[in-house]
Image (cartoon, rainbow, N blue to C red):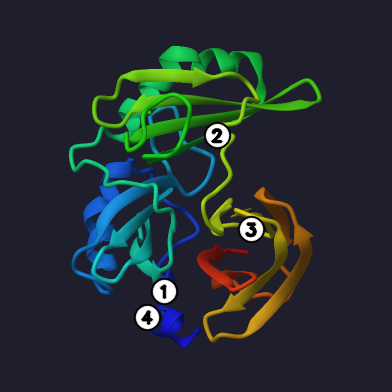
Amino acid sequence: MKRFVIVLVAAMLLIANSYAQLLARDGVDRARNACRVYANDVVLRMIASADSNVTTSGTETGWVYSYYSATQNSWYTAVYTSAGAQAFPGGANDPSLTNIPSTFSNSDVAVSTAEGNGGSAFRNSHTAVNLSLVGGSFSNPLVSAGTPVWIAIYAGNRGSTRESMGIFVNMSTGALIGILDVNEPITAQLPSSVALKQNYPNPFNSQTTLQYSLPTSGNVVLSVIDVNGREVATMNQGNQTAGDHSVSFKADAVMPSGQYFVRLQSGKAVRTMPMMYLK
């Protein structure tokens, strides 16, 4: 665990309680430079909003970038806010992801396309609407493998039902690709490997959702670890089926603000993801 925390003792301490609104492209250079601490040949393969509060202007208070190094055969994650960028070992860990083009359409273009092709109508027909944005060459039924796309994911309440919708936008051109109907899964395929996804929201206050995927059934143990390597919480999920899973984590009343790690263990697989807690 020490190799994960050597460069993280002071990580994210510059982040204030308020954040400027940023476009996805704003943090690319600084995120890449931060990841080059680990490997010089890192290439960008995924971008995600740090929370599900992307504005209709395509801005967010933070973005998460996943980079891949061929020489290290490793993934790295960089979190960028107005306070700067911090990089961590570990990331998307998805071999199906391909490089994102350097001239990718920015998040404002993606959201504008989404809003004009069903997003605005979704807002008008639902309450408590949240929007998250993720970019990469994800396996999905609308485009051929290896095609980078933005997916604008709308979630909102219709009466007592929580509904969602995914709008796919070509990441190279900013043009609409297609829409997945409300509550239709983005992909029905099982993951190819154990994956620990970024918690939501992140940074979080009091409570957050931990998300992970299993290619086959297996026993799952989730741990929350501080920057000194101490385990502050353990959640034994028992034997779980293949597919996507999530569990809610609530911070203890005495848990201090700062940088933490989520560690997932399933069989021989171990995955680690950073997260930030702010009281």
Q: Is residue 157 above or below residue 208?
A: above
**Residue tagged by mark 3?**
205
User: CA separation, marks 4 and 2?
Assistant: 36 Å
Judging depth in this view, the residue of 116 and 20 nearest the camera is 116
- Residue 163: where, in percent of width, then height? 68, 26
Q: Is residue 58 visible?
A: yes
| Label number found at residue 187 | 2
- Mark 1: which secondary structure? loop
**What amino acid is labelled 3 in the image?**
Asn
Among the 4 quarters of the image, the one containing residue 126: top right
Q: Secondary structure at mark 2?
A: loop
Residue carrying label 4: 7
Judge whether 219 appears above or below 166 on screen: below
Q: Amino acid at mark 1?
A: Ala
The total number of labels drawn is: 4
Q: Which of the marked residues, 1 or 3, is nearer the chain's N terminus?
A: 1
Q: Is residue 69 left or right of residue 186?
A: left
Task: Using a 10 Å C-alpha cutoff, classify the residue at mark 2 as few (fewer than 14 neighbours), some (14 to 19) or many (20 or more).
Answer: few
Q: Nearer the viewer, residue 120 or 174?
A: 174
Compare marks 3 and 2 and give the one earlier in the sequence: 2
Asked if the residue at tag 1 contacts the one at tag 4, i.e. Cβ–Cβ closer than 8 Å, the answer is: yes
- Camera-nearest residue between 10 and 155: 155
Asked if residue 124 lies left or right of residue 79, the reply is right
The CA span between labels 4 and 3 is 24 Å
What's the residue at 47%, 32% (across, down)? 140
| Mark 4 or 2, nearer chain start | 4
Which mark identifies residue 183? none
Crowding near pointer 1: few (<14 within 10 Å), some, many (20+)? some
Of tags 4 and 2, the one toward the viewer is 2
Q: The disc labelled 2 sits on which kind of residue?
A: Thr
Looking at the image, is mark 4 or mark 1 nearer the viewer? 4
Secondary structure under tag 4 reads helix
